[in-house]
Amino acid sequence: MATRAGKEARISSINRGGASLRGPPHAPATEAAAERGLRPAPWSDAQIVESAIDAIVATDPSGRIKRWNQGAEALYGYSAKEVLEKPVSLILPRGRPSEHEQLFPRVLAGERIEHYRTQRRRKDASTVDVSLTMFPLLDAAGQIVGAASIARDISAHLVAERELRASEGRYRQLLDAAYEGVWRIDTELVTDYANQSMAEMLGYSVEEMLGRGLSDFLDEEGTRKAQASTLRQREGAKERLEVYFLRKDRTRVPALISVSGIFDEAGQYVGNLAMCTDVSEQREAEARHRETEAFLESVAASMDEGLLTLDGTGRITVVNDQARRLLGYEEHELVNRTLCESVGREPGDGPPSQRAGSGLASISSSSSPMRLDDEVFTCRDGSCLPVALSAAPLGERAGALGHVVVFRVLTERHAAEESAQRELEEMGWIGHLRDAIDEERLVLAAQPIVSLLTGEVTRQELLVRLRDRAGRLVMPGEFLPAAERFGLIRELDRWVLGQAVRLAAENQIVNVNLSAHSLGDPHLADAAERMLREAGAEPWRITFEITETAVAEHLERACKFATQMSELGCQFALDDFGTGYGAFTYLKLLPINYLKIDREFVHDLPENPASRHLVQAMVSLARCFGQQTIAEGVEDAGTLEILRELGVDHAQGYYIAPPGGAARASGSISGTH
Ligand code: C2E
Ligand code: MG
Ligand code: MG
């Protein structure tokens, strides 16, 4: 198109003002023509006319066609032969003669008409869009002898132009409809275009924005920034600026703008274009995030669990004290790194049971809370830390604000699991115990208690054991907690009491342990009384061993029971004396005959003077109340000697005799330790 335009310009300059189509090739210009500014062409008119691509038609003053070049043949479809001497109206479209009637006389009067857009008619009756240049024809004397027209087919050009307009329209539509604000300023930095979004962002109408300068829409700093940037954009720079726009109501809008210079086809700077995004929501979200983080930090500081927060890109932002302590890292060593980078383990690291799953990597992209029960973190010293963790997104939009991760060290969980396991085992004991009672596999061991004054065995403590189906003896420490917890202890104590009554009936003197539950049993006293009566046993042969803790649990009933049984003649020993609280109270409240000094004060008597003082104090106390003392857990001769020196009345322990067969015990009393 450019070459065609160039050609048209050349032809028109050749023919500037007018041209001669006749006469010698180098005919000099006449003075008349020169006076009117019309110069004859220096080249052969015929040559030019024939070789021109454009359609050149010459007519005489009456409008009869005198010249018709090849270009005309091609454009209009008529051969020269067909049209010569015919009126030029032949190629005028129907309905347009008046146009020709106006123009033709003007040309005959010497006027040149350039690039007149009109239409011409072809031989096949179709019309063609042309750009017409008309000028008068001069003879050698400079007289106007006709008119010539140079027509160029511009239909393709018009189509292109229409397309361009359409595409510009579409482009404009796109800009108008764009979600982002589009703002254009001219070379004077005055707004010459703004789309709807831009106007809305600033609270103006599009029309109100036009013609206004930078400072109408930007605060002082923004204006300075933008002005400086436009200078760089003139040099071709494209920049992103963070600015505050001033709305019509003078409130501020934080915005991100991408700016660039606009240049025309010739590369001339014609203005600047800015794509503007309102980032107030983003800024608010960031502010909320900061608030959330501050809140989390204060909560995190007081947590027992480790806590880490991740930003929207999965990088650690906050680490609480506990996490630092557990992982051995300082906060700055973790911040800005991802979980995988900082505490994650390589897929191949460690034994299979300690390999981290792919869970860590998926936390930052998860839009819902998640739990990972078996992760392994790597501490700063390279050691493995088995953890259970939960992670939850911060804010409503997935990943937008980040995540919070809370983790617990699994060893703590293991402790909880162990206690659950213990509970399970205890529960298992209910069945064993039930079966053992039913199958008469409960056995009693008897441990002698000797008088330190005479050295004789004065009585025996009955201690229960369970013989399992394999014949092994199970110690009470294993099954009594379960029996107490699940309500079998009363039955067990009654069974032991039954055995004790039988032994008493055989003239044995026995000590029987009673649990707290039994002390709380309102029917126990009557049952014991009945048993003694039925067995014909003397009540004084039975001593009930009760602990301070058991008494404390059922003080009222324990008092009642003790009163009833002691009135009957039974004796009472306060077991494990000195290990509980409120012993003095019980000494006053209960009819206690013996204080059993706990092993705690006996086992280190030879080397610990404090124990000596305590034992001595207990002895004095007992004497004040008219009670006797029994030292438990005597394991050597030295201890026994000290106890004797301290005035303790009785002793019991492995040194004297371990729990074993009860003297003259009946069949169900064990003969072994
Ligand atoms: P306890 O009544 O204080 O019994 C003394 C415990 O000390 C017995 O443990 C006994 O075997 C142990 N012992 C005796 N001499 C020594 C010694 O020189 N050194 C050491 N280290 N220990 C000694 P056992 O038989 O395992 O009984 C533990 C506890 O179970 C008893 O403490 C008692 O509270 C309870 N218990 C035992 N039999 C019965 C029972 O028939 N009914 C109830 N309710 N509780 C019982
Ligand atoms: Mg005891
Ligand atoms: Mg004891």
Image: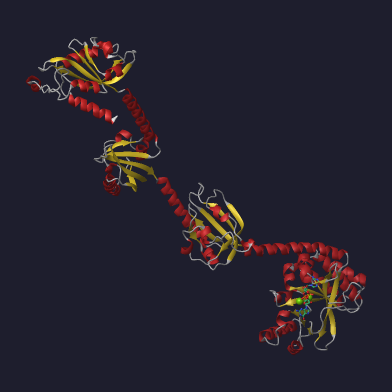
In depth, the one of 404 and 350 nearer the eye is 350
Q: Residue furthest left?
A: 31
Q: Residue at x 74, y 69 (%)?
A: 555
Which image quarter holds the C terminus?
A: bottom right
* Res 487 visible: no
The x and y percentages for residue 286 are 43, 51
Q: Decide: is 461 above or below 12.
A: below
In depth, the one of 226 and 548 nearer the eye is 226
Q: Decide: is 631 above or below 305.
A: below
Ligand 1 shows up in which quadrant of the image? Answer: bottom right
The total of numbered circles placed on residues is 0
Q: Decide: is 627 above or below 342.
A: below
In the visual, does 138 lie left or right of 214?
A: left
The x and y percentages for residue 91 are 28, 13
Quadrant for residue 168, please give it.
top left
* Res 560 visible: yes
Q: Residue at x 8, y 22 (%)?
A: 35
In the visual, does 230 lie left or right of 439?
A: left
Which image quarter holds the N terminus?
A: top left
Q: Residue at x 30, y 35 (%)?
A: 208
The x and y percentages for residue 101 are 21, 12
| Figure colour scheme | secondary structure
In depth, the one of 189 and 670 nearer the eye is 189
The x and y percentages for residue 670 are 87, 74
